[in-house]
Image: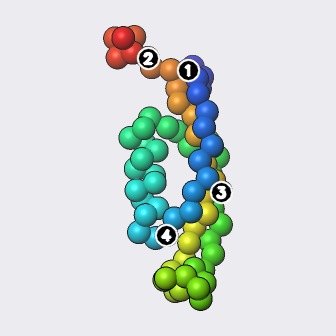
């Protein structure tokens, strides 16, 4: 069984249109989500999009060691 060789914490705020790009960035970067927490809050009256809901996301992700040494070299 392979263990994680690197961990990283991501704390970002997104709206409904950018949250998928965040997940795509994680997956294409080789990260696996270990912990996920999401707080949703309205944009607020002073925001440029007051009806939009913002998601404050905290993710702890890890990368595993490559199985094939040829891909590392």
Residue located beneath label 2 in the image: 67
**Along the horizontal axis of the image, is 23 left or right of 57?**
left
Q: Is residue 32 left or right of residue 58?
A: left
Nearer the observer: mark 3 or 4; the answer is: 4
Question: How far separated are the C-alphas under marks 4 and 2?
Answer: 36 Å
For residue 71, above or below residue 22:
above
Task: Pick whichever of labels 3 and 4 is earlier in the sequence.
Answer: 4
Q: Are marks 3 and 2 in contact (CB under 8 Å)?
A: no
Circles 3 and 4 in contact, beta carbons < 8 Å: no
Find residue 15 and name its label: 4
Q: Could you tell me if the residues under marks 2 and 1 are in contact, i.e. CB atoms within 8 Å?
A: yes
Q: Secondary structure at mark 3?
A: strand
- Label 4 Cα crowd, 10 Å radius (few <14 / some 14-19 / many 20+): some
Residue 68 x %, y %: 39, 14
Number of the front mark, 3 or 2? 3
Above or below residue 24? Residue 34 is: above
Q: Of the residues under marks 4 and 1, which one precedes in the sequence?
A: 1
How packed is label 3: few (under 14 Cα within 10 Å), some, or many (20 or more)?
A: few
Which residue is pictured at 45% across the width and 20% down the height? 66
5 in relation to 70, above or below: below
Give the quarter of the figure containing the N terminus: top right
- The residue to which callout 3 is attached is 37
Query: Quadrant location of the C terminus?
Result: top left
Label 2, residues with CA under 10 Å away: few <14, some 14-19, many ≥20: few
- State how far apart marks 2 and 1 are (Cα): 8 Å
């Amino acid at each position: 069984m392979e263990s994680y060789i690197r961990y990283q914490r991501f704390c970002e705020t997104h709206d409904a249109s950018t949250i998928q790009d965040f997940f795509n960035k994680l997956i294409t970067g080789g990260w696996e989500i270990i912990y996920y927490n999401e707080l949703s809050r309205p944009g607020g009256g002073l925001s440029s999009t007051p009806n939009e809901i913002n998601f404050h996301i905290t993710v702890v992700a890890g990368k595993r060691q490559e199985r094939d040494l040829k891909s590392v070299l």
